Image (cartoon, rainbow, N blue to C red):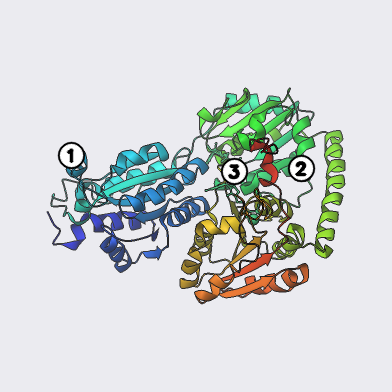
Amino acid sequence: MVGNSLTKTGANLLIEALQKNNINRMYGIVGIPVTDLARLAELRGMKYYGFRREDSAVNAAAATGYLTQKPGVALTVSAPGFLNGLTALAQATKNCFPLIMISGSSERHIIDLSQGDYEGLDQYNAAKPFCKKAYRVDRAEDMGLAVARAIRTAVSGRPGGVYLDIPADTIVQEDDTSDQANLGVYKLVDPAPKQIPNDEAISRAVDLIKNAKKPLIILGKGAAYDRTEKQVQQLVAKTNIPFLPMSMAKGLIPDDSPHSAAAARSLSLRNADVVIVIGARLNWMLSYGNAPQFNPHAKFVQLDIDATQFDSSQPISAPLQGDLKSILDKLVPALLATGYQAPETWLEQIAQDTEKNDKKFAQRIANGKVAQKFGYYGAIAPIAEYFQQHPDTYLVSEGANTLDIGRDMIGMQLPRHRLDTGTWGVMGVGLGYAIAAAVETGKHVVALDGDSAFGFDGMEIETICRYKLPITVVIINNGGIYNGIGQVVPNQLGPTTLDPTARYDLMAKAFGGDNYFVSNYDEMKNTFARAVDSGRPNIINVQIAPSMGKESGHIGNLNPKLNLRPL
Ligand SMILES: Cc1ncc(Cn2c(C)c(CCOP(=O)(O)OP(=O)(O)O)sc2=O)c(N)n1
Ligand SMILES: Nc1ncnc2c1ncn2[C@@H]1O[C@H](COP(=O)(O)OP(=O)(O)O)[C@@H](O)[C@H]1O
Ligand SMILES: [Mg+2]
């Protein structure tokens, strides 16, 4: 039945339900059958951001979820639009970022009889393997409940992506049930209930940590997402236990903290006898907790909301299940009550290694500023200096060498100010994440991209310019994936080669933004702060030598090598 009283249509009930739960932004691309739904959202006061490709819109919704702990909302059309968004929905779920992807779809009976609808696809079932949960709404009267379930599913327990499938018919269908007959739209009570660990689990963990000779804390993006900065800063300050932040946990404790073991990462992992894993997974990024990277005799304490994460790769001697804040609110006082302090000898060992490695790194940066061949260290040094002086700037980064060297060079002082390629190491998330960071926080954002990474979602520079967002996109152009010298056959472009002379910056100019081109340290030094402080959308194209860059950056060991020489 086509709605004649707008207020009772599926579309209107959807928007009302989102707004009732303080969700007032939508990122998407419109078309059949969701164009009027987006228009109605704007008429009802929601802010809709139109993107150039669905995965970027879903990435923006994912970053919103990570930054706000409320699910970001993305809107796509059916079939191809849905499929374009699906990769980002899968990535968000892998990253434990809460979001709701809403896609228009076809009527069940047409799909189930394979009658060949316009952009017909069984989206509801196609989405299931790639999200935390998929829901489909066939009746307008169910919309309030569907939105409530989608929000709660996205943020409770381990956060993740939810797919909400809305057939064209439901969008216009009128809920003609009596107000008594259905739940209408309502505000959820406590969407992400606290989960508090029992005292026995806390005592077990305290007993293990208080006897540690070489304790180490690993902070993951779960600790950043759950806003544990106060608790972890107190834990480290009072016990002197050194910490290692994973990339998106940087800034939970300022990177220049004397307790950071980041510059002594290998030594600290190899020697730690008790490893306290807080909102991180012992996955490929942490060598599954295996030797030789880790001490083969290490004992693990793990804090996580998802109990199935324990013993994923190592025996966990002290599992602590719950939301991280609730766990730490019990664990920290219990540990402090023992008066435990990390042994001085351990801290001295880390400090010496840190001093040695810091000296080497400083030399590399100093050389980079004067090197004949302009490279990453000279290009990124001005960015690192800027972030020291302007800690409340957001950084998004992707690439291989650009990502890895940028991560080591740019210290973060505040939590959740760095977003990057995440657990899967995905290219093409940068501009969607940057847009969400700018929209959700109102702060200046720097997107630090390799030239290949920029190519995945570069058209969103038009979105950035159209909404006049304060985003500076820095593209480190070494002419290729990993570098620009990947030719295999003479006089033929290789599989990893791109254009080392490309002027990506002119894309900003094409859409009314500012563009800058630099090819040495002094030019970068004189340009970067000016570009970011302008608060205008802009691209800085940083041309470095094509020889700069290692295959797969710091994770070249993951690339299977063939002996290509005899060919
Ligand atoms: C969606 C997607 N496609 C391909 C890759 C493979 N890949 C690709 C294509 C990278 C780009 C590296 O080149 P870059 O120019 O962005 O950075 P550097 O040249 O500074 O290393 S890094 C990497 O793992 C990926 N991670 N994600
Ligand atoms: N609110 C939360 N409370 C407790 N654990 C959480 C919360 N949110 C996410 N997590 C957990 O944090 C972990 C994040 O791990 P991961 O994404 O691998 O971090 P990193 O990549 O930084 O090491 C996941 O196992 C997830 O279950
Ligand atoms: Mg490159």
Residue at image point 79% right, 62% down:
373
State the residue position of label 2.
261
SS under mark 2: loop
Q: Is residue 234 visible?
A: no
Asked whether mark 3 and ligand 2 are closer than 8 Å, the reply comes as yes
State the residue position of label 3.
223
Tell me residue 479's x, y (percent). 65, 59
Report the Cα–Cα distance between label 2 and label 1.
60 Å
In the foreground, 370 or 21:
370
Ligand 2: image quarter: top right
The tag earlier along the polypeptide, 1 or 3, is: 1
**Residue 5's image quarter?**
bottom left
Which marked residue is nearer to the observer: mark 3 or mark 2?
Answer: 2
Asked whether mark 1 and ligand 1 are closer than 8 Å, the reply comes as no
SS under mark 3: helix
Question: In the rendered image of this protein, does residue 172 appear above or below residue 142?
Answer: below
The tag earlier along the polypeptide, 3 or 2, is: 3
Tell me residue 164's x, y (percent). 32, 47
